[in-house]
């Protein structure tokens, strides 16, 4: 009954999972529905910006050569022959000693070669006509934003895989993309195991206080990661469990089960993987919490057997499931962003395995500090509420003191990281 | 026509806006719909955790006193009288030399005072009955998670104002909150001004290449900030514009207009504020971009006159509109998170006003570096796509060199900051 399992390094486990990358798929969505999705195609400029020569200021458009001899003693005078509001088109081309009153963003009229700001002009009326005069020479090209000066037609603006934030959306809109090709979300099935689980609306029953798990599983799914489908709980018997999982596998790209992967009497998942003919990539990882995390591959599908403990489930999801989902979403930085931070607290609990401690980050004048987010037992759900990172404490040490510099994996960072190797090096570097 | 406006400091402007805090309002939503909302009530533990004494491991529950004399030479033997799966209840109380096989998370049976892990027990059968023996003394209390050891009933778990992330949601579910009281989103009306705007689906027309703005305005609205309603464009004439705004004000808490606040012929907003009888809090801020940002108060409503330039609009929204919305959402850290970072690039463009440069952050072994996100003219929309922070460059300097330490305001941070004063001090400190 007590099966021997050989633990593998976290980075080896991640690498094994990532060798089973899902096929990237894309779909066309309207710009109204693209928030937080990832681009499956790059955004290319469909027109130059600006698309015409335009004025960056309110002022007068004139021919620069008409100011050639202008001076304080000998101002150059211009008749104001047109008036262009932003969005209006010039009605007249300019000739010698003519000016067009022009608003910010409006198109430069034919003939004009510069714009003079209001503030440097004197306007006056004479014989019912409007005039403007200038006391200095203006160089050709002054205050004219040339067509294409900002963006050339065909220019690459935003790379594929980029998350569509408000800025990216503004770029899409600017270039007339009312539809956009985005990464299709992989379909992720979630099944909880074990009769100890209660749905959230059930009242507390003796022996059943772990009712948050099924809900937690569903909520560990920020936007844009996958399309989650909750398939309820697995019975505690092998045959019906096996058939349920087989049916669910017809509908999903990835299957997450929580619980059922340790070595207790009711832990059915190992038997189910065997019965399915799935290849178990690993069933023990040298980490706390979540050492029993198991991942199996079946054809193009991946089965994540996460721990039934909420924190271990959380860590297993972030380390192993997140990157495979992100990679399928065209993200070339699928891993959790790793950086270093100064420990704010002592952490005395030694363990031969690498610890991932639920923590939060503060910024101390641009230098990160990391604080533990509360009690760090794998079954303590309340500390999850305050965690914004995982502090990585390599195993084998007798504990860590406040002031130590350690690796942290940022949970709320939106950028990610291209490789998990850096983490491996950091671990080795610190022994 | 050229009106004189006296610029005020950014921090003074922010403080003027925040003196007109909106009334906080709350509503009850189901746990399924609470993602990214903010708690209007604290989360209190409705029951202790665990709610009963339970086993943290798979093993045997026994009476510790029965191991008093156990040794290698003289093992203590126990008859296995019951078997409790997780979620099942004990069927029997334990008596002398009896053991119950118990799974992780299951309730400790009456009479038992410790749990022994499988690995240290030898099991055997005799006369059709199951037995277990132990070769050492086990202290009372070993491997028993006491009821309430993690959380006491009535304990404050998560403060009001906290954003509901997956961890907070797990806490809600654990304590049976199937409904939760969250901050009601203020209703934010958005109106674009100016006929230079095209809707995104319109094709490029001569003189009208700024069609992204109306869309951008709508997309500058991450979840949980407000309930946005787009009211289309304002005509270029005063009377119909005034009436449109008056009608919209009947339906919103905050009104954002974009454009129409500078000093060109068609900039109607100053006239409209006057006609409405609104108190203009300021109409010029010592900052770039967005110096013409105007905010007016009318009773309990705020009118944000943001610049028509997309980047200036973006900066104005983040500095002035964001904190008033966040405060209404019970967030006691309503301001953009400010920290310091090392400049990765030179920035030579001097300006008497404080500059907010669209930039992005990288983490260099736990120290933040800040990089400009591309061309930084206020009308360049493409750089918005890559901005994750605003770099703050105080005015009056001749420019900044790579390696300088500057303030940055983090745009994608989810925590925020309690006060804007620190920014003011930093600015002064650097002259």
Image: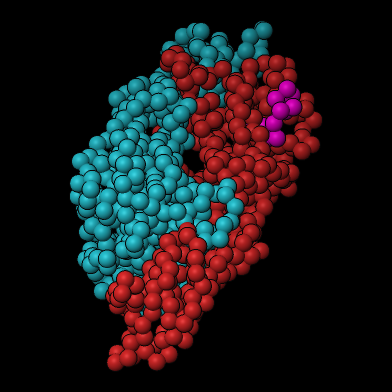
Chain colours: A cyan, B red
Q: Is residue B411 left or right of residue B156?
A: left
Image quadrant occupied by the N terminus of chain A? bottom left
Q: Is residue A221 left or right of residue B4?
A: left
Q: Is residue A177 left or right of residue B318?
A: left
Question: In percent of the image, x 60 and y 26: which residue is there?
Answer: B230
Asked if B291 appears above or below A127 in the picture, the reply is below
Asked if B354 appears above or below A172 in the picture, the reply is below
Res A306 visible: yes
Task: Find out whether residue A425 is within the magenta segment.
Answer: no
Question: In percent of the image, x 34 and y 72: which residue is there?
Answer: B129
Asked if B150 appears above or below A12 in the picture, the reply is below
Image spot of residue B141 (x, y percent):
49, 80
Q: Which quarter of the figure has residue A31? A: top left
Res B123 visible: no
Image spot of residue B91 (x, y percent):
49, 65
Q: Which quarter of the figure has residue B376? A: top left
Image spot of residue A72 (x, y percent):
56, 28
Q: Could you say which is closer to the camera, residue B351 or residue A301?
A: A301
Task: Find out whether residue B248 is within the magenta segment.
Answer: yes
Question: In percent of the image, x 40 and y 26: which residue is there?
Answer: A29
Image quadrant occupied by the C terminus of chain A? bottom left
Q: Could you say which is closer to the camera, residue A140 or residue B409?
A: B409
Image spot of residue A135 (x, y percent):
54, 26
**Segment tinted magenta in the rendering:** B246-256
């Amino acid at each position: 009954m007590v099966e021997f399992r050989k633990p593998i390094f976290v980075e080896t486990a991640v690498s094994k999972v990532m060798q089973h990358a899902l096929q990237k798929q894309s779909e066309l969505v309207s710009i109204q529905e693209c928030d937080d999705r990832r681009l499956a195609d790059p955004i290319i400029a469909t027109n130059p910006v600006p698309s015409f020569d335009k004025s960056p200021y309110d002022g007068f458009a004139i021919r620069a050569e008409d100011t050639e001899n202008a001076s304080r003693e000998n101002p150059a005078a211009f008749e104001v022959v047109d008036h262009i509001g932003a969005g209006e088109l010039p009605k007249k081309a300019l000739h010698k000693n003519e000016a067009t009153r022009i608003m910010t963003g409006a198109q430069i009229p034919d003939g004009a070669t510069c714009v003079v700001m209001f503030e440097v002009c004197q306007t006056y009326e004479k014989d019912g006509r409007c005039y403007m005069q200038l006391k200095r020479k203006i160089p050709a090209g002054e205050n004219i934003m040339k067509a294409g000066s900002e963006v050339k037609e065909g220019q690459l603006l935003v790379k594929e895989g980029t998350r569509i934030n408000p800025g990216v959306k503004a770029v899409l809109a600017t270039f007339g993309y009312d539809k956009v090709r985005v990464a299709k979300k992989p379909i992720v099935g979630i099944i909880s195991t074990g009769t100890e689980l209660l749905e959230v609306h059930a009242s507390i029953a003796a022996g059943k206080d772990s009712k948050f798990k099924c809900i937690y599983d569903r909520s560990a799914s920020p936007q844009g990661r996958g399309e989650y489908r909750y398939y309820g709980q697995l019975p505690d018997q092998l045959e019906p469990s096996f058939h349920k999982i087989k049916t669910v596998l017809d509908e999903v790209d990835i299957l997450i089960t929580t619980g059922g992967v340790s070595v207790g009497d009711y832990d059915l998942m190992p038997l189910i993987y065997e019965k399915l003919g799935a290849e178990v990539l690993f069933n023990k990882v040298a980490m706390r919490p979540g050492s029993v995390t198991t991942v199996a591959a079946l054809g193009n599908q991946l089965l994540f057997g996460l721990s039934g403990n909420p924190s271990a489930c959380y860590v297993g999801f972030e380390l192993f499931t997140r990157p495979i989902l992100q990679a399928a979403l065209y993200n070339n930085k699928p891993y959790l962003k790793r950086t270093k931070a100064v420990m704010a607290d002592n952490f005395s609990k030694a363990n031969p395995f690498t610890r991932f401690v639920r923590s939060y980050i503060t910024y101390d004048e641009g230098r990160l500090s990391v604080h533990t987010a509360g009690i760090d037992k794998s079954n303590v759900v309340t500390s999850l509420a305050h965690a914004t990172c995982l502090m990585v404490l390599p195993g084998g040490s007798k504990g860590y003191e406040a002031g130590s510099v350690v690796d942290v994996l940022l949970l709320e960072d939106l950028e990610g990281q291209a490789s998990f190797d850096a983490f491996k090096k950091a671990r080795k570097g610190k022994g």
